[in-house]
Amino acid sequence: MINVHDILETIRMIQDECLDIRTITMGISLLDCIDSDIDKACDKVYEKITRCAKNLVKVGEDIEKEYGIPIINKRLSVTPIAIVSAACSASPIKFALTMEKAAKACGVNLIGGYSALVQKGFSAGDRRLIESIPEALASTSCVCSSVNVGSTKTGINLDACKIMGGIVKKSAELTVDNQCFGAAKLVVFCNAVEDNPFMAGAFHGVGEPDCIINVGVSGPGVVRSALKKYPDADITGISDVIKKTSYKITRVGQLVGVTASERLGVPFGIVDLSLAPTPAVGDSVAYILEEIGLEKCGACGTTAALALLNDAVKKGGVMACSRIGGLSGAFIPVSEDAGMIAAAECGALAIEKLEAMTAVCSVGLDMICIPGDTTEDVISAIIADEAAIGMVNSKTTAVRIIPAIGMKEGDVLDWGGLFGKGPVMRVNTYSPSKFINRGGQIPAPLHSLKN
């Protein structure tokens, strides 16, 4: 039976509280495109992407019109290109250019999968791809890249952490004329998941179907609005409110995912429950934490409040959807969250506090601008620290930091749109070089031995 109250409530959430579907992401396997001739392989990649995704944008737009639900992004993810390009001896840059061409032909916002999985070591294809990342990101506007350097099962590849410090820095340097945007399209993971619909870390895992639809929801503004109605609730009551609100948000994601799947003739994968903020006023995870009772995000108690939020979002959402996956929780990207931006600008929020928050949130150190003179070894050590949190806690963590070339603490990089703007934050500059340059593999924790 249709409940008129529920319909009106959903309309209000969309119109007044920034409820939207952040992305529908089509994952496409490119394993059948592998060829030792790079030109033939790229031709196969282009043909398959454009064939599978030719109607993705249209279907998304049709669903928006019919249901009145904003779908902000339509995206693609593909098999990690390091795997696809391994049979070719040439530079994988051609694959990045092919991905860009195919993405534009399909009309999508972004395409992810210029990726490598090196948590336990490198193949020749991995090395070539990683070395090409800065040029690939500088040469394209839609292509996103990710590298997985660790996992709970394998430990952390410290050699990969060292290399990625230089890759992040060079990606920023090659795009200095575009606000160092190359680094904003690059994520370094520990425990990367195969069905993540969010950029820049999305790739289509080898255990996934040939083609699939994954959905990422949003809704921080809806959660904050719900909490405003209960100013005197105890913390258990706050958790219940978040759970009930998360359920409603996730039902919208389930509807969009199933409908898109049916119309595209592609299996429905998962709904990622992550509360994805935007720079829009009110659409902020930081503001939720402040609504719970913090004077400013970053104050003592922030980590505990975020743990409560993350847990309640998952508990509420899991009952509302047939398949939950991706990252699922609460994102804390600084540049993409108006409240995080404000907290960083006034000094309430530092990188050290953000690192503590990543132990309980959805991902990690996300969209953080750091001084342009930060050394490669310091960047590598930040990656290693974050990977260690993910490895020990059996969760996905990530680093997406942007060295603001030529800028110092207090300056601002501004990309506009969903990427927002990032205040350059202070970084501890004491040297970790001896540690990073030891190389080798940080062993997996004892609890990895679960078999």
Image (cartoon, rainbow, N blue to C red):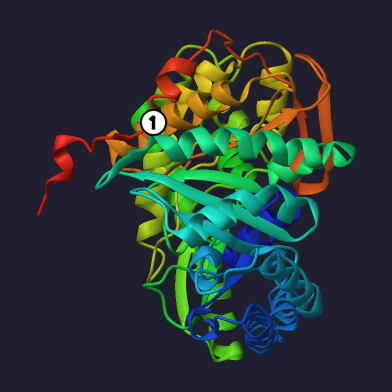
| Local crowd size for mark 1, using a 10 Å CA cut-off: few (<14), some (14–19), many (≥20) | some
| Count of picture labels | 1
Left or right? Give the position of 191 relative to 60.
left
> What amino acid is at disc 1?
Gly
Q: Quadrant of residue 379?
A: top right
How far across and how far down the image is residue 44, in percent? 63, 86
Judge by depth and name the residue closer to the eye, 114 or 93.
93
Q: Quadrant of residue 67?
A: bottom right
Q: Secondary structure at mark 1?
A: loop
Judge by depth and name the residue closer to the eye, 414 or 187.
187
Q: Residue at x 47, y 11 (%)?
A: 300
Q: Quadrant of the C terminus?
A: bottom left
How far across and how far down the image is residue 306, in percent? 45, 30
How far across and how far down the image is residue 387, in percent? 40, 35
Q: Residue at x 14, y 36 (%)?
A: 446
Rendered position, 214 above or below 55: above
**Residue labelled with disc 1:** 439
How far across and how far down the image is residue 18, in percent? 70, 50
